[in-house]
Amino acid sequence: LKDHDAIFANRDIPVAAIKGTFGGLDIVWRSNGPELHKLRKLVVSEIMSNKGLNACYEFRRREIRHMVKNINGKIGSPINLSEQIFLTTFNVTVNMLWGGSLNGEELNLGLEFKDRFEEFMRLMVEPNVSDMFPVLRPFDLQGIESKAKKNISWFYEFFESVMEQRRKLGEGPKMADSKDFLQQLLELNQTGDVKTSLSMKEINAVLLNIVSGATDTTFTTMEWAMTELLRHPDKLRRVVDELDAIIGGPNIVEEFHLPRLLYLEAVVKETLRIHPPAPLLMPHMPSEPIVVAGYTIPKNSNIFFNVWAIQRDAEFWEDPFQFEPERFLNVIEKRNYKGNSFDFFPFGSGRRICVGISMAEKIMMLLLATLLHCFEWELSNGRKPDVKEQLRLVLSKVEPLVAVPIARSSNSMQYQ
């Protein structure tokens, strides 16, 4: 990932992903080369840069306030917090992409997106004889290819309906002063410059990458963070005390508060250490034979990095199975998400590192700070939080987190 980054920058794409990305036209599964660099540069410069993220702040702020309003209406009653967190992150993401969100009956569409993408991920990691023996691919013996094709068509119909609405809107004066990411993608589809133009298949594949990646990773991490804090009341108390000291009771959590919330940041990092969203990262494939640590790795091998095990290794971490956010405080070498420390790289490392780190960090911090500043949380019927894990491409909880919100004085009323 560092010394041999360029050699290991390719992907061995499974059959299910081939069908879901038009043969690997997206960012996640595309082979290393100029086309991948073009897509990554586009996403980073237009969405993930400080300028792009700051321009979308009001979208994040609005959806967070809407979440608080929804929870306020359910004070004292058990709510599916996992579902609420997912819908909020989903709305934040699509707002940043094309300025829309789901409300009322449309919320079912967001939940269907979640269910279908979970099924798509399950198909990608399911052992498939067609991946092991490519000569058998035309026969689709397990039906995985046909299931993936049927499942993925729903996403592209969804994106096509959004793009059709945008095309109609773009014909009038409403778009004169506005150009969101979707609009820029559609304009790149019309340019004749080979170096910058995008096909409609590429646009669909990139939209699926961003919506699913930003939503699923962020939602899963926040679900685990809330679960761990409910399991450790002393850590939860320390987070709340920090929020009260930095933000104050009657005030609203804003993004300019986030750099000062050091313990909350440590909680997020510790959550990512114990529950990395992609525990094996995405598979890497060497473009040529190479010797690493005395072992010869053949060309086109499928290489997985067990981040889950590395980040729980007692050689690097004291009491590695304990949830201890304090381990990230007052350290000489501060660990970050850039993949420079090979005992902590939950988003990968090198040229295939996740492009959405900056956006994920902002959403996770803002969402978690708001949930804990506005409400106290307890489990219904005195139950303990379930910590059973299930592995798809993302490491998620088996059981959704259901908790009871209790208003903290008038804090949540400030978001009305």
Image (cartoon, rainbow, N blue to C red):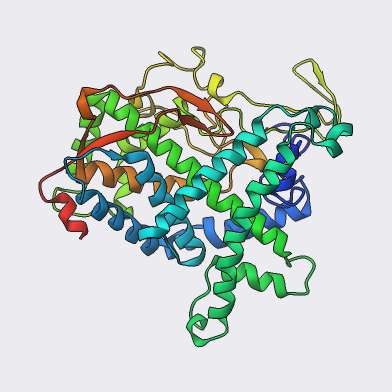
Which residue is farthest left? 409
Which image quarter holds the C terminus? bottom left
Q: Nearer the viewer, residue 187 or 74?
A: 74
Residue 222 vs 24, above or below: the answer is above
The percent coordinates of residue 54 (x first, y second) are: 43, 61
Q: Residue at x 51, y 34 (%)?
A: 277
Residue 133 vs 87, above or below: the answer is above
The percent coordinates of residue 398 (x first, y second) are: 45, 27
Which residue is farthest bottom? 173
The percent coordinates of residue 68 (x first, y second) are: 25, 52
**Residue 213 horizontal side relative to residue 250, left or right:** right
User: Which quarter of the figure has residue 82?
Assistant: top left
**Residue 156 horizontal side relative to residue 327, left or right:** right
User: Which quarter of the figure has residue 228?
Assistant: top left
Residue 92 vs 198, above or below: the answer is above
Q: Nearer the viewer, residue 92 or 390?
A: 390
**Residue 375 horizontal side relative to residue 224, left or right:** left
Q: Residue at x 57, y 34 (%)?
A: 340
The percent coordinates of residue 194 (x first, y second) are: 80, 67
Q: Residue at x 38, y 51 (%)?
A: 88
Q: Nearer the viewer, residue 407 or 33?
A: 407
Query: How many numbered callouts?
Result: 0
Which image quarter holds the N terminus? top right
